[in-house]
Amino acid sequence: MSPLVRRLTPSEIEAYDLIPEHISERVILVRVPLLPGPYSGMTLGPVVLLARTIRPEAPQPLLAHELVHVRQYHEMGVPLFAWRYNRAFVKGLLQFRSWNKAYRAIPAEQEARSLAADWRRRRAAAAATSALG
Ligand SMILES: [Zn+2]
């Protein structure tokens, strides 16, 4: 049973190489029973909330996605990131009249999805290469 609040382990910091180590070292991972709506992960600054159904011990594209948000917060600062994120979301809501489309159109979400997908593909390719041994 892993603790409910913890830092990333050294092997996780190495595995989630899609953000710089000095940023992943600051991450505080919190396991929560549930999150609002359909979400299984949520990030505020260096704090990543993960639903308890997600196993961070396994390579986890969701955690990779949330770590991109940690990097975005780190680069912009919490107030500016939160402002830009929410402004893009409201703009999307007005434009699309759809919660899901507005969420998917947020630039920070697009970057997180794209980098997490690249990370997943790189890991799958590396695993296939080592399986060929
Ligand atoms: Zn996201």
Image: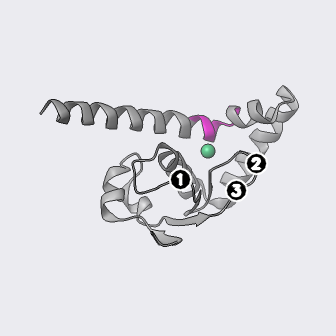
Q: Rounded to the nearest whole Å, what is the CA distance between mark 1 and mark 2?
A: 16 Å
Residue 44, image x, y percentages: 63, 60
At a point 30% along the width and 59% down the height, the residue shown is: 11
In front: 89, or 98?
A: 98
Return the residue at label 2.
37
Counting residues from the N terminus, which is met first, the one under dot 1 or under dot 2? Answer: 2
Furthest-top residue in view? 96
Q: Which mark is residue 35?
A: 3
Q: Rounded to the nearest whole Å, what is the CA distance between mark 2 and mark 3?
A: 7 Å
Amino acid type indicated by mark 2: Gly
At a point 75% along the width and 30% down the height, the residue shown is: 101
At a point 68% along the width and 33% down the height, the residue shown is: 104
Return the residue at label 1.
54
Secondary structure of residue under mark 2: loop
The residue carrying mark 1 has its beta carbon less than 8 Å from ligand 1: no
Question: Alpha-carbon neighbours of circle 1 within 10 Å: few (<14), some, or many (≥20)?
Answer: some
- Which secondary structure dominates the residues rendered in magenta? helix
Residue 61, image x, y percentages: 47, 43
Is 106 left, or right, of 1 in this rendering? right
Q: Which residues are magenta?
A: 105-110
Residue 71, image x, y percentages: 51, 53
Question: Alpha-carbon neighbours of circle 2 within 10 Å: few (<14), some, or many (≥20)?
Answer: few
Q: Say whether residue 107 is magenta.
A: yes
Q: Say whether residue 20 is magenta.
A: no
Secondary structure of residue under mark 3: loop
Furthest-front residue in view? 1
Is 132 left, or right, of 85 in this rendering? left
Colour approach in the figure: one colour
Number of dots carrying numbers: 3
Secondary structure of residue under mark 1: loop
